Image: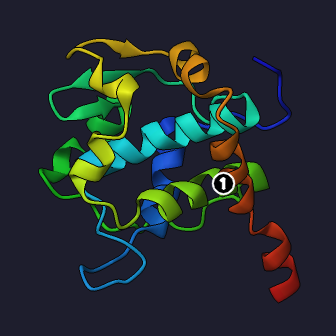
Amino acid sequence: MVNSMYETLSAREVAKYILKMAPKDENDEYGKIVTKGRLQWFLYFAQKFALATYDKAIFEEEIKMSENGPEVEKVRDAYAEYGNELPPYDEGELPPLPNEWQAVINAVWEMYGNAERNEIVNTEPLINSARIGDTITVKSIYQSYKDNNELKSFVRTCDYSQLYEYLG
């Protein structure tokens, strides 16, 4: 993989950005409410999109396969006290993300924000071939998607930084 100038975040930080963007009620046209399982899938997709587009992991933690799909254990544990629900986002302001990482998170929302679970699960051969307890390594994700030019182009179109600068 190519070294990059983009700073790697923790999976918990990425989760906070995802939750900050998450719809607050079921009637939001922007997407479905983020459940714990959906958050874990979004973390997997953020890692996939980052590796495919920028040749760098967006976070360092391992992703393991659980009964419900991909899972970052530190994020699962951080929200364990909330039962089946995720807490509403209320952790104050987050530092600005580099444009590339913001594009990755925007792309996850663009592609999967309104997707049903079966639409998400059935599109991932890497996940579908993993067994419970397997680690889904950064290397395996990178090898599976590094040549996906369609995905790279899509993520790059989700870099809205120039629009944000224009809008002030």
Dot 1 falls on a residue whose secondary structure is helix
Please, is residue 104 above or below residue 52 in the view?
Answer: below
For the N terminus, the image quarter is top right
> Which part of the image, by quadrant, shows the C terminus?
bottom right
Residue 35 image position (x, y, % from top left)? 24, 56
Q: Residues within 10 Å of mark 1 (few under 14, many from 20)?
A: some
Residue 148 visible in rendering:
yes
Where in the figure is residue 8, as x and y percent of width and height?
A: 68, 33
Which residue occupies the foreground of this view, 32 or 72?
32
Q: Is residue 28 left or right of residue 157?
A: left
Q: Nearer the viewer, residue 148 or 3?
A: 148
Q: Horizontal placement of 52 versus 87: left or right?
A: right
Residue at the disc numbered 1: 154
What is the three-letter code of the residue carrying label 1? Phe
**Looking at this view, is 83 or 46 the one in front?**
46
Which colour assignment does the render follow? Answer: rainbow
- Residue 98 visible? The answer is no
List x then y, in percent, for residue 21. Answer: 48, 68
| Residue in view at x 63 percent, y 50 percent | 104
Q: Is residue 53 above or below residue 138?
A: below
